[in-house]
Amino acid sequence: MNTLILRLALPAPVFGLFDYLPPPGVDPALLRPGQRLMVPFGPSERCGLLVKLTGETGVPASRLKAARQLLDEQPLLDETHLDFLAWAAAYYHHPPGEVLMSALPVRLRKGKSPLKPRPSHAFLRQVPEDEARALKKRAPRQAEVLAWMQGQGGCIRLEDFRRRFPSGRSALNALCAKGWAALGLGESAPARAQTPPHDLEPEQQAAVTAVTAGLDEYGAFLLDGVTGSGKTEVYFHIAEQVLARGCSVLLLVPEISLTPQLVRRVAARLAVTVAVMHSGLSAGEREQAWQLARTGRAQLVLGTRSAVFTPMPRLGLVLVDEEHDASYKQQEGFRYSARDLALVRARRAACPVVLGSATPSLESLKNAMDGRYRWLRLTRRAGGAKAPAMQVLDVRNQRLAGGMSPPALQALEQTLGRGEQAMVFLNRRGYAPVLSCYGCGWLSDCPRCDARQTLHRGQGKLICHHCGSERLLPKICPSCGSVELHPLGQGTEQLEEGLSRRFPDYPLVRIDRDAASRKGSLDRLLARVKQGGAGLLVGTQMLAKGHHFPNLTLVVVVDVDSGLFSADFRSAERMAQLIIQVAGRAGRAELPGQVLLQTRFPQHPLLRSLVEQDYNAFARQALKEREMAALPPYSSQALIRASARRPDTAEDFLQQAAELAGQLAQGRVLVWGPVPAPMQKRAGRHRAQLLLQAGRRPELQHLLGALVPALSSLPDAGRVRFSVDVDPVDLY
């Protein structure tokens, strides 16, 4: 009789699984893939995930060790999900143990017992208005809690409640005892009236019909809708039909900033339990949400890119909002694309996947043009709102006030005077990108990067946005001792300061990563804007997508030039997407919108095509250029990056990798480089990169399958850190 071998995934940088014997005293019939076991590993022990039971092993019997403990009675992941994770590890050529273990919550990776379910949220039920009014006199504390919950949309996290009312649990319990509130798991709206669905426009109804016609089979759909066309309403109508069949829905969003408002809309509209997954939650909150999804108690999972790995029984629909967003690509460690894995996940679950965007990626547009995706178009704004008028402002030879041209300031004054809101957009946080000495020319260079440290005047610091290094703002020049230190360029802090002086009678809200760094602060800022507590908005790309401000009629893009010229061939596409997304915030209701684009290159073809035509016209022209240059999506790429303490070490390692790749490729894959990275020094390490490109994806994958496992054996491998990035979204 063959010996039973347990094949486990362990969190180790090894391209393979590990074989162990069953733990002593455990009935082999109790062992199933997806369970965790503690196993000896070197001088210590680690938690591993059982992937396969087999009777074969390549490890000599004398070296086989027995697992020490079975941690789970039931599998945490089923075999279908394990296969999906293994496929992802193979496609992106990342150690499978690290990929499979990263699909578990942090505590479970360490071998700890799963947390017991506990209430995480409070919800409002129907509250009688007359009794609520009487409550103000009888129980003012309860009335205060009730009013706050109503202001938060009726669905709040208990953690946020404890922060707002440190001693208010008795008041909340009293509301629950009255039947006015309830505690529960996940974000949902039990016993509350649903928000009624909006009537669909013909194009929206056609999109819903197309997707729901095949809910029992895989189908990929590109929902290409102009900003304000009601893509979210299409998501809701499709999700309603999927949920009615007893299936679950996975909804991915690119940014944490989009999550709070969308959660409330989903919970109120669909009246289901929602598991929220993103990095802004504590480890315990993420685990509770993960368990809700895994057990099926949450019918809808809403999260950022890592949510694509969440186990979900009876997955019936995958939605990827803002599918073009680069945030869906993980840039450290396991470098995966959540958008691309969402397609694979849907295919394996035999369910539809909808990719939605007002500015689809060129890859998705080509797939739609080639018929691989069904192309669903929404060309009209919902409710009859008109697209904003776009105008290029030539700021050459103009005297700018804090980065603002006279026509832009005049437009702001007129808009605010009418009682409407205006947004000033600059994708650069901080006060100024550089601090300079007028005496000797000193610049605030980062000591660890080939970059400048940004001036953050509010914090009194110079901070590098690439490595995080910081120092106190100097009072005199570190080089010559002069006091003539001055900021160069503008950031959102400086815009806020200048506009507050220029328009003191109009409340201003700044929204960027610095202003919204505390938990819940972004939600509060957005609520203030929507309630009319701000006439002026200043912000970065956090404001560019997913937000609906009915009274916003003017958008000023302070600097579009930074994205027009770059070493990365995707820069024009990204700039076009950003301009359209920002412009889409204006004129979303009855009031017409206007967008002003400040530039020193008014004849740039990108700007002309966007202003005179639309995003699709730009995209078609960009695709022609990509095809002539044989760039993605007309080819497939992989980028091997290396970094080292010494300048030449990384390039020496990549030269060895290039020679090996050339031997293995046999002319079927182009090997470009090695070359220094565009930012050669970052966080104290010197960086270089090697680009592999093939006309067909299978040829590139075949090469990587032979090359990547051999990289660790190259002579200089021990002197560098290296990574493999399949389908890179930037070349930095």
Image: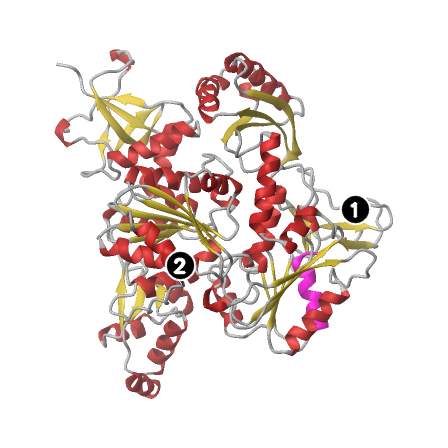
Q: In the image, what residue type sits under mark 2?
A: Gln
Query: Looking at the image, is 684 positioned above or below residue 652?
Result: below
**Is residue 110 in view from this perspective?**
no
Mark 1, residue position = 478
Of all residues shown, which one is farthest toward the right? 439
* Residue name at image x 26 percent, y 17 percent: 64
Position in image of residue 492 (x %, y %): 65, 59
For disc 2, the marked residue is 204
Q: Can you see residue 384?
A: yes
Query: In x, y percent, where is residue 476?
Result: 80, 52
Residue 520, above or below 297: below
Residue 236 in the image, given as x and y percentages of width and height: 35, 59
Q: Secondary structure at mark 1?
A: loop
- Image location (x, y in percent) of residue 280: 44, 52
* Residue range corresponding to the magenta coloring: 490-503
Say which label, 2 or 1, has the lower sequence index. 2
Which is more toward the observer, 136 or 309? Answer: 309
Q: Is residue 492 magenta?
A: yes
